[in-house]
Amino acid sequence: MSGQPRVVVTVNPDGSVSAETQGVLGEGCLHYVAVLEELLAARTVHSAYTADRDRVPTVVAQEQHDVDRA
């Protein structure tokens, strides 16, 4: 995966729609649920968190120091 957040939407043979977020860390996926409900004029019947909920973003800090050489 490229690291970009994605929503995979599937229309099932019975007409029901399912969606899964990928690459959305923490509870940010809840925002996508609300957006999909609005776009599809639908309501959520069942939802569950993916493993991404418990992942935390990796932050890389880089510091630069000036060192006086004696």
Image: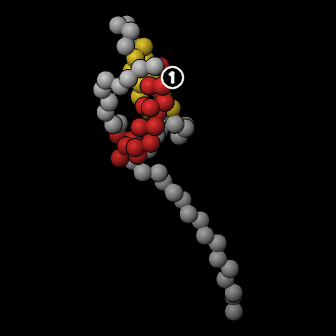
Residue 54 as seen in the image, left or right of residue 40:
left
Badge 1 marks a residue whose secondary structure is helix
In the displayed structure, 26 sits above or below 66; it is: above
Which residue shows up at 37% across the image and 13% down it? 16
Q: In terms of depth relative to the viewer, which is nearer, 62 or 16?
A: 16
Residue at image mark 1: 39
Residue that lies at the very extreme toward the top in this rendered image: 13
**Which of the image's four quarters has the C terminus?**
bottom right
Circle 1: is it few (<14), some (14-19), or many (20+) Cα within 10 Å? Answer: few
Q: Does residue 36 appear in this view? A: yes
Which residue shows up at 48% across the image and 25% down it? 38
Residue 68 as seen in the image, left or right of residue 32:
right
Residue 28, image x and y in percent? 44, 42
Q: In terms of depth relative to the viewer, which is nearer, 31 or 56?
A: 31
In the displayed structure, 65 sits above or below 29; it is: below
Residue 56, image x and y in percent? 42, 51
Q: Does residue 8 appear in this view? A: no
Which quadrant holds residue 64? bottom right
Residue 48, image x and y in percent? 31, 33
Which quadrant holds residue 67? bottom right
In the displayed structure, 44 sits above or below 23; it is: above
Which residue shows up at 52% across the image and 36% down it? 5
Residue 41, image x and y in percent? 46, 19
The amino acid marked with disc number 1 is Leu
